[in-house]
Image: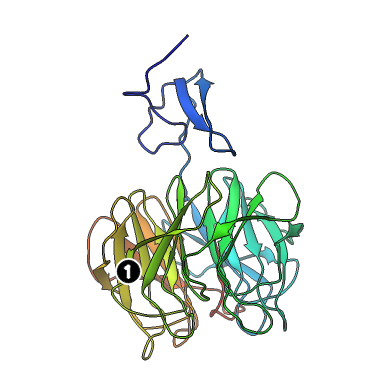
Amino acid sequence: MTRKINNSYELGQSNAPDTGGDMLKTRADGTLVWEGVADTTFVPYSFQGSNSGFIAGGDGVSNTINKYAFASNVTADDHGDLLTARRNGAGSSSTTEGFTAGGHTGSASNLVDKFTFTSNVTASDHGDLSASIYAKAGHSSSDSGFTSGGADNSDVASSIVDKYSFSSNTTASSHGDLSVARTYAAGISSVDSGFTASGFTTSNTTTIDYFTFASNTTATDHGDSSVSKRGVAGCSSTDYGFSCGGTGGGNSDVIDRFAYSSNVTSTNWGSLTVARGDVTGTSSTTDGFVAGGTGSTDTIDKFSFSSSSTVADHGNLNLGIVAAATTGSQY
């Protein structure tokens, strides 16, 4: 039996129908297979959350996890603790849990821990990265977390991309390399690819890399940010990546936007309410959220993915958290 692929949908494709039927699925080895989706409950994978953003850890080596609602402007709630206190981890999100990978505890860590979005409890151990690294960027596919770049205990910038499964507690595996080794970059996720924007090598960079979740290869250049900076927050809509704030010749308030579909220099998409570095991004289906950072200890900003304008204040982090160098995830 043969089937043509024209006018077919891939499982997880953002515009796939929700009425069921056969769809294409990409296996971990990159091959395509048909997946039968028989009922109307099928919901395509989306990186964005619909309910809440979560901010974990932070400068001063914190273990606090904060939770704030996307729909209301209020002070964040305490949502338990990381297994190990640390700063500059990399955040990833499954549909039910948040993950914090690596970070700095006084030295670089390889720990991956996870917490449930729906209950306030201490995070549990979920394996290890392939090496002890901090200041990595975090990305998420439908079934795996990814980290890119970072630095080791000698503060040497890394190009490593690691991959770990959301469903099993194991050591992460290598998933290729960035085109440029760097630290403190923004992690951004589309349905099928991770993007690593800006960061620091021996100086700040504008490079945006992308790598596919399905294949283990060296990342490719995907254009540039409009400003060289590090300590940048990443936010992700269905079609665009956003890199926000950061430090480059002083703290920045710039929000950059780039299309997943084209390799071009980013365009300006407005300004944060306060210029700051070491910021953390989370994403709802309609808006980007930028939390904390140097020069602004507890501010949460919100901006629309659909219109370019200066962002609005969206409440504050819980005052118990040190709000720079935190880790973000969304539910």
Rendering colour mode: rainbow
Question: Count the marks: how many?
Answer: 1
The amino acid beneath tag 1 is: Asp
Using the rendered image of the protein, determine whether residue 95 is visible from the camera's viewpoint.
Answer: yes
Q: In terms of depth relative to the viewer, which is nearer, 318 or 250?
A: 250
Q: In terms of depth relative to the viewer, which is nearer, 300 or 13?
A: 13
Label 1: few (<14), some (14–19) or many (≥20) C-alpha neighbours in 10 Å: many
Classify residue 56 as left or right of residue 281: right
Classify residue 286 as left or right of residue 40: left
Classify residue 6 as left or right of residue 212: left
Q: In terms of depth relative to the viewer, which is nearer, 132 or 17?
A: 132
**Secondary structure of residue under mark 1:** strand
Residue at figure coordinates x 47%, y 65% from the top left = 179
The percent coordinates of residue 91 (x first, y second) are: 57, 62
User: Would you identify the image quadrant in which residue 309 lies?
Assistant: bottom left
Residue at figure coordinates x 41%, y 27% from the top left = 18
Q: Residue furthest top?
A: 1
Residue at figure coordinates x 50%, y 64% from the top left = 178
Classify residue 172 as left or right of residue 42: right
| Residue behind mark 1 | 224
Residue at figure coordinates x 47%, y 80% from the top left = 200
User: Would you identify the image quadrant in which residue 262 lies?
Assistant: bottom left
Q: Residue furthest bottom?
A: 249
The percent coordinates of residue 138 (x first, y second) are: 54, 62
Question: Up-down: is 233 above or below 28?
Answer: below
The percent coordinates of residue 326 (x first, y second) are: 56, 73
Using the rendered image of the protein, determine whether residue 330 is visible from the camera's viewpoint.
Answer: no
The percent coordinates of residue 330 (x first, y second) are: 52, 56
